[in-house]
Image: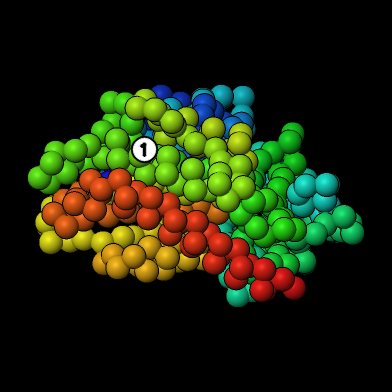
Amino acid sequence: MIRLPFFLGLLIAVQGLSQTTGNNFLTGRTNGKLPYLEYGLGSDRLGGAKMTFLDTGVVVKVVDSTVINYRVQLSGNHFAYLPKANFKRDSSVSIKPYYLTGSWLVNGDDKYDYVSIALDEKLPYRSMQLINPSKLVVDIFGVTSNTNWITQRTSVKEVKNVYHEQIEDDVFRMIIELNHSQHWGYSIYYQGNRLFIKIKRQPDELQVSKMKIAVDAGHGGDNSGAKGITSGILEKHYTLMIAKEVEKMLTQAGAAVFMTRKEDVSVGMTERIEMLKNEDPDFLISIHLNSSVRDSVKGVSTYYRYIGFRPLTQYIQKAMLEMGMADFGNIGSFNFSLNGPTDYPNCLLEVAFLSNREDEALILDPEFHKAVATQVLCGIQEWLRACEKDKP
Ligand SMILES: [Zn+2]
């Protein structure tokens, strides 16, 4: 079960910002841990749909306010919502009528490829993954092209081609073609006013024994998650038991495994994401147990947010179905915190439903935990074999 990861935004009143500032907007920069933008003020259990994470220090123009969010203007036509906790007012920031892009550099070091672009200011951005063929698309807001050359070095391994288009007067689109069908992740950040897109390469050896795999046991500590319908067992204990079996199975297969928690402790979502970004795994499996108000609903499901990360979730779903579980589905665009990072492929696995009697009986059985671990390993192996086949 996924609990509400971010606060709901409630539009209270259209505050007249002009009364306090003399302007009809506030200026400042993104601040704090993992700032992010939302498209709107969604109020289902997963909150507003997230547009992107942003680096800190990114210039922000606030044009309106809700209880917990600011409405920010990204460009003439684009707006988004930023948590107030992620905004630091700075009246010395003046928003210019337009900014310009500079030259690009496309290069690689011994581990990553980099696409970087000089800008006049740390401007907001968002990104998207495309497939068939695989590409990254990065939009930078509030900026007009003055890119007069792109330097490309032979040290790149994953980047095939780059180009750009001014899709609106003040929205600049960078398009990055990749060599492999599988997206292995990327990070976007600033160094000074230069925007970097750090791109992960497909590992040379696509074997579990060469992988660093992160395993996340959902909930923990004061966050117990869902409850068993007849037994009253807590999700947090069983996600950990299953995660430990997965850890054991992957370790036996030779993988390096990182666990976000190993005990019954509270670990917040921001903390988990920061840990995972530091660990920089090849990919992440997050383990939860599902719950529904309808006790007839049962089965296994896997979830992804970005299309480029879908294959891992499909292979794990397929492997789980081989155990005879009901197919609750492979679910995309999922607005779950740990599906949010773009830095590595990630898969949320909702093993079975605690709210269904048959599924609950499985969850209570330690042999089932071992079987889940075996199937997760099989799914990963099948996925890696598929990646092997499409080497360019
Ligand atoms: Zn859960």
**In the image, is residue 23 above or below residue 255?**
above
User: Residue at the location (28% across, 26% down)?
Assistant: 222
- Quadrant for residue 190, please give it: top right
Give the residue at x 60% y 70%: 386
Q: Position of residue 60 (x, y in %)?
A: 54, 37
Q: Nearer the viewer, residue 221 or 51?
A: 221
Nearer-the-camera pick, 290 or 189: 290
Q: Position of residue 192 (x, y in %)?
A: 74, 34
The image's colour scheme reads: rainbow
Seen at 53% across and 59% down, the residue is 380
Where is residue 183? Give x, y as percent. 61, 61
Q: Classify residue 233 as left or right of residue 53.
A: left
- Number of numbered markers: 1
Element type where label 1 sits in the image: helix
Give residue 315's position: percent from left, percent from top. Answer: 47, 66
Disc 1 marks a residue whose amino acid type is Leu
Relative placement, left or right, of 153 versus 186 is right
Tell me, yes or no, if residue 56 can be seen here: yes
Q: Quadrant of residue 256?
A: top right
How packed is label 1: few (under 14 Cα within 10 Å), some, or many (20 or more)? many
Residue at the disc numbered 1? 240
Q: Quadrant of the C terminus?
A: bottom right
From where the camera sits, is residue 348 visible?
no
What residue sits 72% from the left and 71% below the top? 391
Q: Is mark 1 within 8 Å of ligand 1?
A: no
